[in-house]
Image: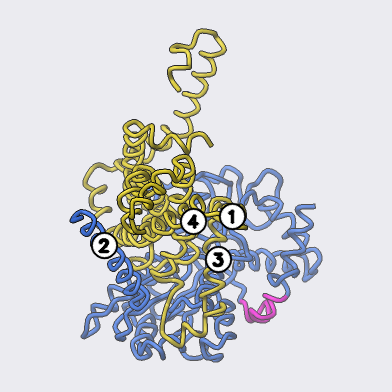
Amino acid sequence: MTTHISRRWILAGAAALGTTALGTSLSGCGQRNDGTSLLNVSYDPTREFYVAYNALFTADQTEAITVNQSHGGSGKQATAVIEGLAADIVSLALAHDIDSIAERGLIAKDWATRLPYNSTPYHSVIVFLVRKGNPKSIRDWSDLVKPGVAVITPNPKTSGGARWNYLAAYGYALKANGGDEAKAIAYLEALFRNVPVLDTGARGATTTFVQRGQGDVLLAWENEALMALATTKDAPFEIVYPSLSIRAEPPVAVVDKTVERKGTAALAKAYLEGLFSARAQKLVAEYHFRPSDPQAAAQFTEKFPDIEQLTIDADFGGWKKAHEAHFAANAAFDQLQLRLHR
Amino acid sequence: MSAKAARFPKTPAAIGLTLFVIAWMVLVIILPLANVLFEAFARGVAPYLTSLAHPDAISAVKLTLLVAAIAVPLNAVFGIAAAWAITRFEFSGKGLLLSILDLPFTISPVISGLVWVLLFGAHGWFGAVLQDAGIQIIFALPGLVIATILVTLPFVARELIPLMQDQGTDEEVAAVTLGANGWSLFFRVTLPNIKWALTYGVLLCTARAMGEFGAVSVVSGHIRGLTNTLPLHIEVLYNEYDSVGAFAAATLLAGLAIITLILKTFLEWRFAGELAAHRKH
């Protein structure tokens, strides 16, 4: 009988333990709400930069602060925030993704005007990464549509970087064809015919090109390309600057609804404003982004060559228009995909 | 089984087939696993240990163990209850119940994750209620636990059902006639009879719970040091060009798999008779 009782006690103990664990996890949820921890939800290529910036930021604070990071394709991350990922800060690949969050009422509609340079502390351009010695002699956009050239770019439906790639290519084709939209779309179709894999994010595409050795040319953020060069031993590839590129602006914003709930409004604001400080701007350049502050940028002219750049607002009428024309359901990119797979 | 088979392959076809199977196993299992080890130690032992000692790696290991520690006991309790209900009682809709029990085996893990986002996400059915109550399920530990529970739901029940069907109810009926109540019936008759199959099911369940990637990837939110389990941590490191770190973490998972394999083989060898029932299926 004693063994019987003890077994019952063991079971009761185990059940109690399980219930407690579940209860704790339900109430605690791994998120502290005492206003000393921030969550920065960002896109792929900023991983290394924010590790460095978080160290800089937390060292300057009087109390102990934790900054947590989450990274992934920009569109995917925006969806996660909309679905309830408790981000205090979003730092995404393009304004459109932050606009989507703002449309759901989580961020004030005028977010872009709350910080300098359209809330963009750093920017970049789209460049080509090619194999060492440039064996396919890829010099400009027109070389990408030649037969036998395999182009790696992520999917514009899920990746912010890929949208910048797409628009840069489109802008080039418009210019080369005297503004003829049909010819520009035909160019894009020829370009995507040369794309063997569409990864979901910029980092995935870089890994495909750099580590798996796929493709002849990678369309990439300049910062991704420079990072790949810096982190790969005896890098067997080199950067090509095309005749025309686009100013790729990844903006940042405080998620008003979350910071209100968590009591982190002041801290989150300080975190973003800190990105524009002289020290952070230098860090920006060290992590291969172009600093937005002209004074900081002037110190790195050698690292970041001058290149003719389109801008989303001046040349494409802003993200809303570009999104509706190219990336919305059934818009130009979907049409193009249909034609490619017919 | 081995007694019935010829001890050595005699015909050229048999030798060829055996060689093909061995070559294929080397190609698709041994070679990739050896590569994991090779990449993990590519820069020596020190970088290997350093990457495992990183706070994010330690937190990923802890989280993985915690998720398994909550999900597996719950699934074990459910598995016993389900197996008991299915093998000891007659009721209509039993076939349907068995089919539904197998659903987690057949649906993609991505779906197993997404269904929870649709239920508990900010715009899900219970999103508003949960938000008002300040309870975070998706993108936090509870989400990881329920996604894991769903994916590993059938393992214990599927091990127990054939065995309990095979054993029948004779011993239990005898115990009841001798005056045993429900609890003592369970602890003194049923549990001793199923303990090795239960252990086996729990083992498989644990292995899958710790290795699950798809479903937890959907509900994790990928916050480093907080909601990245070991498989997600490996992906993060791989995408940061930290192949030593990624493969070092992968050796941990592979190590867990090998321990599972050893325990599984031991159970099969030692308790072959008691586990035999499920092999007939």
Q: Which residue is mark 2?
A: B55
Which of the 4 image quarters holds residue B259?
A: top left
Q: Which residue is mark 1?
A: B94
- The disc, 3 or 1, on the residue closer to the chain's N-terminal end is 1
- Under mark 4, the amino acid is Ala
Mark 2 or 3, which is nearer the eye? 3
Compute the Cα span from label 1 to label 4. 9 Å
Residue A323 within the magenta-colored segment of the rendering: yes
- Under mark 1, the amino acid is Lys
Query: Which chain does the numbered disc 1 sit on?
Result: B
The magenta stretch is A312-324
- The disc, 2 or 4, on the residue closer to the chain's N-terminal end is 2
Mark 4 or 3, which is nearer the eye? 4
Please, is residue A287 above or below residue A103 in the view? above
Number of residues whose C-alpha sits closer than 10 Å to that of mark 3, classed few (under 14), some (14–19) or many (20 or more): some
Q: Position of residue A29 (x, y in %)?
A: 36, 75
B196 relative to A324 in the view: left or right: left
- Under mark 3, the amino acid is Leu
- The disc, 2 or 3, on the residue closer to the chain's N-terminal end is 2
